[in-house]
Amino acid sequence: MKGAIKMKKILSILAAAAIALTCAGCNNAGSGKKKLKVGSDVTYPPFEYMDTDGSTPIGIDIDLAKALGEKMGYEVEIVNTSWDGIFSSLDKGDYDVAVSAITITADRLETYIFSDPYIENWQSIVVLADAAKKPASPEELAGLKVGYLEESTSDVYLTEFIAKNNISVETFEYATVMSAFDDLAAGRLDAVIADSTVSARYIADSKYTQTWLQTEGEPELFAVCLTKDKTELRDEINKALKALKDDGTLDKILNTYF
């Protein structure tokens, strides 16, 4: 009987030890960084695009997301998603935030919240450097074939401008801005209207030239986009973003690509 009691004690001790080890393993597993999933349309240079290996996302937004994650203590995972699905995927929870050169607009503020802005942007017109027609204003796009990224602020700007000024422009929507510039290079378009921050990358190549830069009104502001239930995460991001501005990290990121 004593032997049986002693054996029960040993088994109890072993069981307790096993539970302790299991719990310790759980604690170790949970001691790593929290994960922050970031949605981004990785076809939008210089903000997000693939490196020369074709599989590594790079760009302003990618570097910014990683820098924010480091400040906040998060491991960042980039989730590549198409622009036309970036908001619906955010709604579904496929990622925590969207960082993809997203402009703060009145319409978007009805559904989403945004971080503080990290860069200003204007609209611009780009043509081939040897183009016969070089539109110096949106009015001069009349009669031309003009491409732009679908469902973007460039899309909204040109559509509203055409309607307001009653001009005839042959417009072409593209799923990616890279495709629009590819068609411009191939001569299938006369011009592309795009974010000035994107155009800046293309006109660095002497093949292209910028013929118009928006100056009226207020600049667009790019920011991190979140669903309205993520106010605490938004506040964390704003705190980290301020730190990146104060210590010069944000300027360093921007200067890498401009």
Image (tube, rainbow, N blue to C red):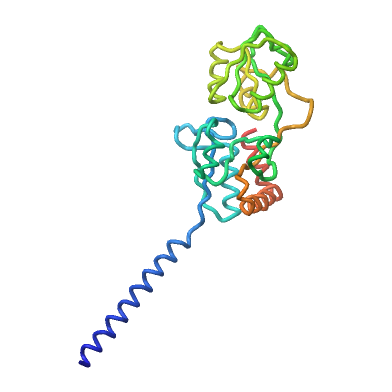
Q: Is residue 248 left or right of residue 185?
A: right
Q: Is residue 172 left or right of residue 158?
A: left
Please say whether residue 63 is visible from this viewpoint: yes
The vertical placement of 206 against 15, above or below, is above
Q: Give residue 110's quadrant in the image.
A: top right
Q: Tell me where residue 62 appears, x and y as whole percent.
A: 56, 40
The vertical placement of 100 against 170, above or below, is below
In-front residue for pair 25/225: 225
Query: Residue at coordinates 64% horizontally, 40% vertically from top-left?
Result: 111
Please say whether residue 128 is visible from this viewpoint: no
Extreme residue in the right direction: 216
Rendered-image quadrant of the N terminus: bottom left
Q: Tell me where residue 29 appears, x and y as whole percent.
A: 43, 61
In-front residue for pair 221/134: 221
Q: Tell me where residue 40 appears, x and y as whole percent.
A: 54, 37
Rendered-image quadrant of the C terminus: top right
Query: Residue at coordinates 68% horizontally, 27% vertically from top-left?
Result: 196
Q: Tell me where residue 77 appears, x and y as whole percent.
A: 50, 46
